[in-house]
Amino acid sequence: MSRREGSIAGVAALALTVATLTLPALAYDETGPVTGGGRIEGKVVYNGPVQTRKIIPNKDVEVCGGIRDEPLIEVGADHAVQNAVVYLTQVAKGKAWPAAGKTPELDNRKCRFEPEVQVIRAGPLEVVNSDPVLHNTHGYYGNRTAFNMALPNEGQRIPTDLPRPGTVRVDCDAHGWMEGWIYVVDNPYYAITGADGKFSISDVPPGNYTLVAIQSFTGPVQQSVTVEAGKPTDLTIELKKQ
Ligand SMILES: [Cu+2]
């Protein structure tokens, strides 16, 4: 092998290593209705101290409200966590996505993001301003800007796109305390917990999966789940501050 060929092979090997480490999402294959699937259900809990943050609106207080403390994690009775997101990763195939309906929305309303936490399929998102004040809505995949838009007018709507799976944090450059979360997924096996902390993911083809539960204050926890045909898997997932 010439020196030149050797160096090209080296580059190829390096590229392969990087690709393996970053674990690119599998292309999800919709097989239609799942027969003999199982259900993953359970509850997300948090047993640690609930920290709060002080919000001090410094402008637009007639819309945004006054000084207050807000919890960094929503914990109800029996340690139940609301608005935790649960999803399966690296799923090759399974049920169809829900029928495409309205484009998912992120609304700026009373200087909050509504919904504050949501899960969407990779693709379009519409950002809305329901307030009579300027919001500058800024979404990030990690440190990288996903979208950044000024919405000066009440009732304004701007379409955007979140093309790849991942966690998108949303800030407002006009109101530093505003924060929202969009979890972009590449398969339809996900849920978001209600006030009782419970979730249910149905029609999972039997097999072994990796399940992630995530909340913005604690970060993610990950665990293996085995799904058997016609049998619910009952889990209690404890979030811990990392
Ligand atoms: Cu704002």
Image (spheres, rainbow, N blue to C red):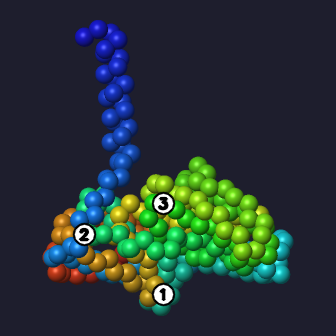
- The vertical placement of 87 against 230, above or below, is above
CB under 8 Å between discs 2 and 1: no
Towards the viewer: 7 or 138: 138
Q: Which residue is mark 2?
A: 32
Q: Secondary structure at mark 2?
A: loop
- The vertical placement of 84 against 23, above or below, is below
| Mark in front: 1 vs 3 | 3
Q: Which residue is mark 3?
A: 123
The image's mark for residue 195 is 1
Q: Secondary structure at mark 3?
A: strand
Question: Residue at point 37% right, 32% down?
Answer: 15
Marks 2 and 1, how far apart in space? 31 Å
Question: Residue at point 33% right, 42% down?
Answer: 20
Q: In the rendered structure, which disc, 2 or 1, sits on the residue that comes first in sequence?
A: 2
Q: Residues within 10 Å of mark 1 (few under 14, many from 20)?
A: some
Q: In the rendered structure, which disc, 3 or 2, sits on the residue that comes first in sequence?
A: 2
Q: Is residue 85 left or right of residue 94?
A: right
CB under 8 Å between discs 3 and 2: no
Question: Residue at point 58% right, 54% down?
Answer: 146
Marks 3 and 2, how far apart in space? 20 Å
Q: Position of residue 223 (x, y in %)?
A: 31, 66
Q: Quadrant of the N terminus?
A: top left
